Image (cartoon, rainbow, N blue to C red):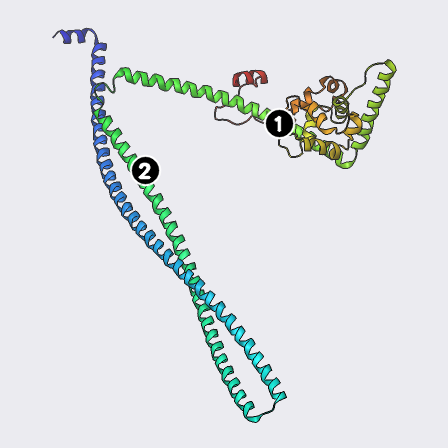
Amino acid sequence: STDAAAALVDPSMARLCGDLRKALAQADQRRNQAQDRLRAFESEAEAEELDLAERLRHERAELAALRDRRRFQAEADIRNKKIRSEIREVESERDAMERAASSLQSEVVQARAEAQAAEALAPNPDAVAAEAASLDAVEQSLRAEAAALRSALSFCERRHDDNRREQVRTAEALRRHEEAQFEERSELEAAEEKLRVGRACVADALAMRRLPMDGGCSPRMLQDAASQVEHRKEACRQAQIELEELHEECGQLLRLNGAAEARVEELEQRIAEGGLKATVERAVGLLKKLDVEARRRGAETLKGAARLVLVLAQICGVPRMAYLALDSNRSGRVSMCEFDSGLRLRFGIDYEAITAMEKPVLRPLFKEFDAKKRGYLSEEDFAHCCPEIWAEYGREAWPVAAPERPPSTPATPTKGGPRQQQQQPGAVAARRR
């Protein structure tokens, strides 16, 4: 009665009690559903484990059969070795027979020569007939032996060919057996891996079953989960904003790269058309003029890399253009070989005469540019080598700047909706860091 009176007095408490009862009923229902799913998963895992165990037994039986086949193959290899040794013995006998046949043939020829000589000296009919008969008999015996040797030789050759074909078939069968063994081993490893995963799943399911289910879906836990979801959504939104800024910065870098490539193509076109020669001559003339003025004032003239930087500043305008023109393979690094070939072939500069350094010039000159001693040059190395000369003698029309984007061209499309106003590159870089 007290609860009824309180409910009549405060209807909101009654609604809250009703909501709590509904939430508890839903939690009990979800717990029962989870238990049903767990039981179904356990039954499926047990069935899969039995299947995997059966497959493992089958694979082990196949592995034992494969081992037996390999043992039989080893025995066949031993037999093949014995056959090959017999073939070698037969071949040695054949060679001996051939040598004996050749010696007998030489004896027959010698006997015929002696018989002819005897006929010429003493033509006795009876002796000649007897000797001719003996010679015919010897010749017939020798022919019979030669025929026997030829037949033995042909038999040995046929046997050798048969053995060679048998070896080829044996090697092919061995290769197929090895491939089958590798496939069976792979299947066995896969089956063992599936069995291990199945056992791990069963263990996890049993561990989940042993966990206490009471209080698993309390309102406090639901609130915590909702707050975590909101926090992650906010983190995703912040990441999307940063991604959009990175896209914008990437677009700016791509436009700068396109402008630099256009400048490089223009410079290469000038080099190909031969208009660079006059520029190089003017730069060398300016260098000589500066040397004369320095000697007249009693000041020190430019030396080493500074002289080359002055010529490059007159030709390229800025360090980046010189770096891009010398990087012939677009690797981002200018090696010593590229440095030498670029100055000689692309620009047509005799840097040995310009720098007036002691020969060999290439390595000391390259080391003056390579202040960090990395073995290659970057854009930063060109810019840090005599920056005052670049600033004084470089041409202002050459610096690479990002082209203006047309107003109708949208920014890099993203999934974050309309873009805000473009931010300064420094702020973007700071946020990226």
Distance between mark 2 and mark 1 Cα atoms: 51 Å
**Dot 1: what SS?**
helix
**Other residues around mark 1 within 10 Å, as few (<14) / some (14–19) / many (≥20):** some
Which quarter of the picture shows residue 4?
Answer: top left
Residue shown at 20% from the left, 23% from the top:
28
- Kind of residue at disc 2: Glu
Which quarter of the picture shows residue 270?
Answer: top right
The answer to whether residue 418 is visible is no
Residue shown at 79% from the left, 35% from the top:
274
**Other residues around mark 2 within 10 Å, as few (<14) / some (14–19) / many (≥20):** few
* Mark drawn on residue 193: 2
Given this view, does label 2 or label 1 mark the residue nearer the observer? 2
Q: Residue furthest left?
A: 1
Q: Residue 323, position in %: x, y?
A: 68, 27
Of residue 386 and residue 174, the one placed in the foreground of this image is 174
Of residue 35 and residue 22, the one placed in the foreground of this image is 35
User: Residue at label 1?
Assistant: 255
Residues tagged 2 and 1 counted as in contact (Cβ below 8 A): no
The answer to whether residue 141 is visible is yes
- Kind of residue at disc 1: Arg
Q: From the image, which quarter does the N terminus lie in?
A: top left
Q: Residue furthest bottom?
A: 125
Residue shown at 53% from the left, 23% from the top:
246
